């Protein structure tokens, strides 16, 4: 007897879980068939479930009928076998690496994304294809979702053009970040010399300022310092000696947007 | 004493009286294979099973569900009966040395 709280679920989640369970069982049976001359397999599996459907205005969810509950609806579902060839013929290819999936775009309202998915639009490329074919996305959505506002979809392709640029930029930033992660800066030696009112700080190491497209910046407790020399193995900057102080100062060296060195710098006691 | 079945991947407990769904299917099919071994010239070429089952459907935080199932755990008429769902399966032999040539 079930004692868990009665929570509602989506049919898709249920079917995914059921298919997963059937796959697990078939894997076990396939393994057993290796040792036995005659083995059996499940060809069809069907369920008749006692459920309460619920509709919240956007989607239908189901709740399992529990002990003592009457008036549940009976819902039948049947899982049949399907060959990989049939799957290829009846389903669309998944969103490829070069396409931009709609779920990754934060600037489109969730309702619009949902409506687009209902008409089979899953990526920015799908919308652009529809626009090229001169189809009206708003009208298509309106047909399946009469309450949708077709005006929200009228300039979608234009909006996405801007978003595509932003997305490509974001992806290139992620790639650069990853690239920098593989080449982390290493500090092997740090020296501080005093020159009158100024202090010259020299860092030696590897992979320090390796990006030519970015000018490194240094801040010492929030005071900017002047970068004298920046290369992969050598980095030097000048600051006012009083900014270091005997208490120590918080030093931040932004070698590039993806590599920041942070130290506490202070004069030694002697 | 309370014993619980813990699914390793999901870390979600279904009712201890119920099994994960795939075990129910395996428990129905595996004994058939064992029955039909040996020199017996006959074998079952289609078996249909239809049984009432209890279902426990656990909804996880991410919306995925975990299924627990078992044949009826209660056989006595009580004022509150558990809800029974119907599970139907068609079981057929796989291509093997016994079925070849059919």
Image: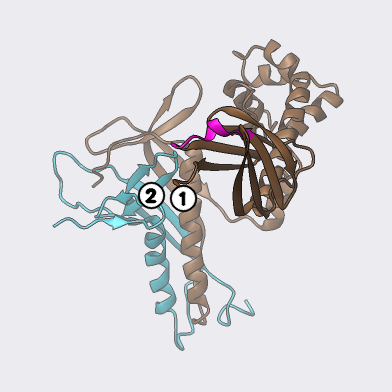
Chain colours: A brown, B cyan
Label 2 is found on which chain of the structure? B
Residue A213 visible in the displayed image: yes
Q: Position of residue A204 (x, y in %)?
A: 66, 53
- Check disc 1: other Cα within 10 Å, few if <14, some if 14-19, many if 20+: some
Tell me if A87 is positioned left or right of A60 in this view: right
Instruction: Identify the image quadrant of residue B21.
Output: bottom left
* Residue under pointer 2: B67
A130 magenta-colored:
no
Percent position (x, y) of residue B93? 53, 71
Q: Mark 1 vs mark 2: tell me if same chain.
A: no
Residue A62: x and y, percent? Answer: 41, 33
Magenta stretch in the rendered image: A239-247
Image height of A203 relative to B30, above or below: above
Q: What element carries label 2?
A: strand
> Label 1 is found on which chain of the structure?
A
Label 1: state its secondary structure.
helix
The residue depicted at 51 percent of the width and 59 percent of the height is A23
Indicate left or right for B5 with A85 as reference: left
Q: Nearer the viewer, residue A238 or A16?
A: A238
What residue would you read off at disc 1? A18
Residue nearest the observer in this picture, A211 or B1: A211
Residue B16 lies, with reference to residue B61, above or below; the image says below
Q: Where is residue B79 in the image (x, y as percent from the top left)?
A: 14, 39
Q: Residue at x 49, y 34 (%)?
A: A245
As for residue A245 lying within the magenta part, the answer is: yes
């Amino acid at each position: 007897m079930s004692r868990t709280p009665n929570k509602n679920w989506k049919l898709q989640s249920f079917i995914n879980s059921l298919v997963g369970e059937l796959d697990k069982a078939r894997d076990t049976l396939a393994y057993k068939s290796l040792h036995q001359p005659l083995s059996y397999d499940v060809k069809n599996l069907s369920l008749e479930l006692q459920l309460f459907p619920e509709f919240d205005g956007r989607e239908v969810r189901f709740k399992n009928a529990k002990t003592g509950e009457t008036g549940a609806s009976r819902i039948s579902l049947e899982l049949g076998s399907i060959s990989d060839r049939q799957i290829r013929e009846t389903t669309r290819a998944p969103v490829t690496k070069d396409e931009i999936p709609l779920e990754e775009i934060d600037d489109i309202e969730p309702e619009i994304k949902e409506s687009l998915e209902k008409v089979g639009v899953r990526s920015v490329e799908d919308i652009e294809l529809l626009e090229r074919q001169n189809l009206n996305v708003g009208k298509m959505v309106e047909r399946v979702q009469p309450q949708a506002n077709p005006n929200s979809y009228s300039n979608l392709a234009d909006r996405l053009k801007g978003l595509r640029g932003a997305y490509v930029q974001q992806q290139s930033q992620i790639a650069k970040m990853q690239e920098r992660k593989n080449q982390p800066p290493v500090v092997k030696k740090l020296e501080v010399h005093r020159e009158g009112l100024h202090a010259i700080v020299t860092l030696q190491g590897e992979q320090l300022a390796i990006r030519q497209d970015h000018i490194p910046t240094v801040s010492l407790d929030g005071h900017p310092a002047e970068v004298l020399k920046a290369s992969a193995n050598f980095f030097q900057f000048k600051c006012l000696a009083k900014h270091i102080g005997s208490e120590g100062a918080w030093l931040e060296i932004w070698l590039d947007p993806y590599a920041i060195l942070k130290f506490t710098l202070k004069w030694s006691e002697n | 004493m309370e014993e619980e079945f813990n699914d390793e991947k999901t870390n979600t407990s279904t009712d201890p009286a119920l099994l994960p769904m795939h075990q129910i299917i395996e428990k129905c099919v595996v004994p058939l294979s064992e029955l039909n071994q040996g020199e017996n010239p006959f074998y079952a070429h289609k078996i249909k099973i239809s049984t009432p089952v209890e279902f426990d459907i656990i909804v996880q935080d991410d919306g995925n569900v975990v299924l627990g199932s078992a044949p009826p755990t209660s056989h006595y008429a009580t004022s509150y009966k558990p809800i029974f769902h119907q599970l139907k399966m068609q079981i057929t032999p796989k291509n093997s040395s016994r079925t070849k040539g059919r």
